Image (spheres, grey):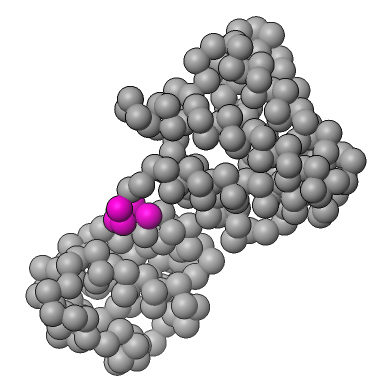
């Protein structure tokens, strides 16, 4: 933890403002996270006391306490009894947790998450085809070969891990950290279904062929072809995940 900056309680409370009457705990957390990810507060900044935050937001202290407890679980703040509550990281470090929290406390609509994932993966493939340097694409290819080897062994668990790493490497090749962070959040929310999505070697073979088509388009530098190949993969992957969600 860096040295604590000067007391900024007055500035923080002024930036927050009052919430509408009856606002739930989740909205208290949202307001705090909007402030934390705005880039104006340094890591280690001490927040105002609960009483002051509650008065500023127009809510009870219990709502503030519960919101801070949730943010501590996410690693966004550090609550130190007898000392205060401190901001843990920079805005860029906190963003993935913030995105995950925002999706988790909202209405969980698996269909919409699948649509969001599909659109993001297609765009990542397009960017990677246009931006990925040879070392980036080599990494994607290595994970494709890991998928192939796992399928030959009949190790579907290893196949799924290599599949995920293929997409992670593709994200790195795309060169857009914000986009990759958002995709990571969406994938994590769908992981309970993704872990069960490939049931047998036939489905794994289809997935492998689709990944291979994406990789070949990347190597050829065809942005439209890479996006199209990923769109085909997302269509079948979404169908599998939707089936798992409907029975999960």
The rendered magenta stretch, by its main secondary structure, is classed as: helix
Residue 55 visible? The answer is: yes
Left or right of residue 78, residue 236 in this image = right
Q: Which residues are magenta?
A: 103-107
User: Do we see residue 165 in this rendering?
Assistant: no
Q: Residue at x 47, y 78 (%)?
A: 38
Query: Would residue 128 be found to the left or right of residue 51 on screen?
Result: right
Residue 105 in the magenta stretch? The answer is yes
User: The C terminus is located in which quarter?
Assistant: top left
- Percent position (x, y) of residue 104? 33, 52
- In the figure, 10 relative to 155: above or below? below
135 horizontally vs 73: left or right: right
Quadrant (top left, top right, bottom left, bottom right) of the N terminus? bottom left
Could you say where residue 200 lies in the image, as x and y percent from the top left?
A: 54, 11
Quadrant of the rendered structure where residue 80 is?
bottom left
Is 146 one of the magenta-colored residues?
no
**Left or right side of 233 for 37:** left
Percent of width and height locating residue 121: 62, 46
Number of marks drawn = 0
């Amino acid at each position: 933890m860096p040295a604590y900056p000067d007391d900024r309680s007055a500035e923080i409370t002024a930036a927050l403002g009052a919430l509408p009457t009856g606002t739930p705990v989740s909205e208290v957390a949202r307001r705090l996270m909007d402030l934390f990810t705005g880039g104006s507060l340094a890591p280690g900044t001490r927040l105002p006391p609960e009483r002051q935050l509650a008065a500023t937001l127009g809510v009870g202290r219990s709502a503030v306490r519960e919101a801070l407890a949730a943010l501590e679980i996410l690693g966004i703040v550090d609550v130190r009894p007898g000392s205060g509550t401190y901001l843990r990281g920079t805005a860029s470090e906190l963003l993935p947790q913030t995105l995950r929290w925002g999706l988790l406390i909202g209405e969980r609509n698996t269909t919409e998450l699948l649509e969001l994932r599909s659109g993001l993966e297609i765009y990542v493939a397009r960017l990677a085809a246009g931006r990925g340097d040879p070392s980036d694409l080599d990494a994607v290819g290595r994970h494709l070969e890991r998928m192939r080897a796992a399928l030959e062994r009949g190790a579907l668990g290893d196949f799924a891990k290599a599949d995920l790493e293929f997409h992670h490497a593709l994200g790195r090749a795309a060169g857009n950290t914000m986009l990759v962070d958002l995709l990571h959040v969406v994938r994590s929310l769908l992981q309970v279904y993704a872990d069960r999505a490939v049931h047998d070697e036939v489905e794994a073979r289809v997935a492998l062929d689709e990944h291979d088509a994406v990789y070949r388009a990347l190597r050829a530098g065809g942005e439209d072809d890479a996006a199209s190949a990923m769109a085909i993969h997302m269509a079948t992957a979404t169908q599998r995940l939707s089936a798992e969600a409907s029975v999960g």
